[in-house]
Amino acid sequence: MTPRRRRLLASAAIFVATGAGVTLVANAFRSNLVFFHSPSDVRANQAPASRTFRLGGLVAPGSVRRSADGMTMHFVVTDTAERVAVRYRGILPDLFREGKGVVAQGRLADDGEFVAIEVLARHDENYMPPEAADALQRARQARAAAAR
């Protein structure tokens, strides 16, 4: 084999290996990508039915209840326009309260209930994730437009 042919073969092998690596990284990134959706998005069927996503909004007042097993919590997340029932098994964050902001990660069950695998509460009085704040603002605007 001539030196030129070896260099060409080595270049082709490096090119194929780099392409395979980029493809694997892109697939891993795509499978771990989690999108944010508001309750209005979920009710409009804009949220993925078969993938994990984040649901954000406010915990509806009077909606928090604990199941008989003591570990499963049921509550409702609202963006002031729509409401989505959430089920979570585990310990809720200390800052979790009715009327406060929350982001839950999980997927929709067949019955339309959101089954959360993780629940995050906002950490202080002034902070809310930008996606949740935008969703609440859009819901308020839609409700104001419908009232006209």
Image (spheres, grey):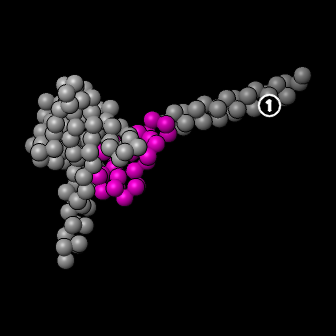
Question: Where's the C terminus, which quadrant?
Answer: bottom left
Q: Amino acid at mark 1?
A: Leu
Where residue 81 sits, quadrant-wise, is bottom left
At horizontal 11% and vertical 45% (from top left) the residue drawn is 62
On the image, which quarter does residue 142 sit in? bottom left
Q: Position of residue 141 (x, y in %)?
A: 22, 66
- Determine the secondary structure under disc 1: helix
> How many numbered marks are there?
1
**Is residue 58 visible from the viewing direction of this image?**
yes
Q: Is residue 89 left or right of residue 19?
A: left
Check if residue 52 falls in the magenta segment: yes
Q: Where is residue 41? Give x, y as percent.
A: 34, 55
- The quadrant holding residue 88 is top left
- Judge the density around disc 1: few (<14), some (14-19), many (≥20) Cα neighbours within 10 Å: few
- Residue 128 seen: no
* Residue at (24, 29) in percent of width and height: 72
Kindly identify the residue that appears in the image at 24 percent across and 52 percent down.
Answer: 83
